[in-house]
Image (tube, helix red, strand yellow):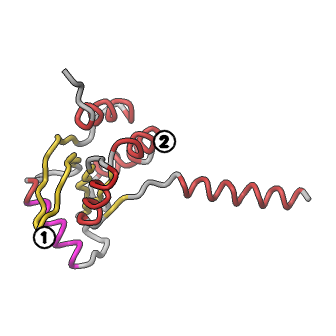
Amino acid sequence: MKKFYLIALFFIGALTSQAQELKWYTDVREAITVSNTVHKPMLMFFTGSDWCGWCIRLQNEVLKTPEFKKWATDNVVLVELDYPRRTPQTPEIKNQNNELQQAFGIQGFPTIFFTSAESKDGKVNFKGLGQTGYVAGGPAAWLTVADGIVNPKKS
């Protein structure tokens, strides 16, 4: 009987941890559709996931924390735009990411750009809300900056 309870507890724990995983979109058009459906801006994370030390640090210190997960679930649609050196990508994702890097004028990594967008007649119009990168001080400091961009105080 104890084995049954342990196995049941294991599966419940596994399901709970999977439910807490954030959805990071890599297809911007899909993210735009979701963003417009749920009425939340996009957080576009420009990263070099397999070579950029500051990107990896931002991931570990902020983006993988419970505080960020809760904030992101409530406030944004997540988009990862990766520029890896060793990890293969499809030509479509590589082209999309290069076009977006040019469109947003991204010159360094990590850069996080907050935006909303509309897609009409095959063309996308972005409305920039602000941007940030690595912020020292852990999740609280980073989330203070991000929340100021996504939820500016009403005058």
Q: Is residue 14 magenta?
A: no
Judging by the rendered image, the residue that carries numbered circle 2 is: 66
Q: Is residue 76 above or below residue 23?
A: above
Residue mark closest to the camera, 1 vs 2: 1
Judging by the rendered image, the residue that carries numbered circle 1 is: 122
Picture quadrant where residue 133 is located: top left
Give the mark nearest the N terminus, 1 or 2: 2
Please name whichever residue, 113 or 137, is drawn nearer the observer in this view of the structure: 113
Instruction: Kindly report the secondary structure that dominates the magenta region of the rendered protein.
Output: helix
For the N terminus, the quadrant is bottom right
- Badge 1: how crowded within 10 Å, few (<14), some, or many (20+)? few
Spot occupied by residue 2 in the image (x, y as percentages of width and height): 89, 56
The answer to whether residue 4 is left or right of residue 66 is right
Q: Is residue 94 magenta?
A: yes
Q: Amino acid at mark 2?
A: Pro
Q: Residue furthest top?
A: 155
Q: Any mark on residue 86, and which? A: none
For the C terminus, the quadrant is top left
Q: Residue at x 45, y 38 (%)?
A: 67
Gap in angstroms between the C-alphas marked 1 and 2? 37 Å
- Badge 2: how crowded within 10 Å, few (<14), some, or many (20+)? few
Q: Is residue 42 above or below residue 132?
A: below
Picture quadrant where residue 31 is located: bottom left
Q: Amino acid at mark 1?
A: Gly
Bounds of the magenta span? 91-102
Picture quadrant where residue 15 is located: bottom right
- Secondary structure at badge 2 equals helix
Q: Residue at x 58, y 54 (%)?
A: 17
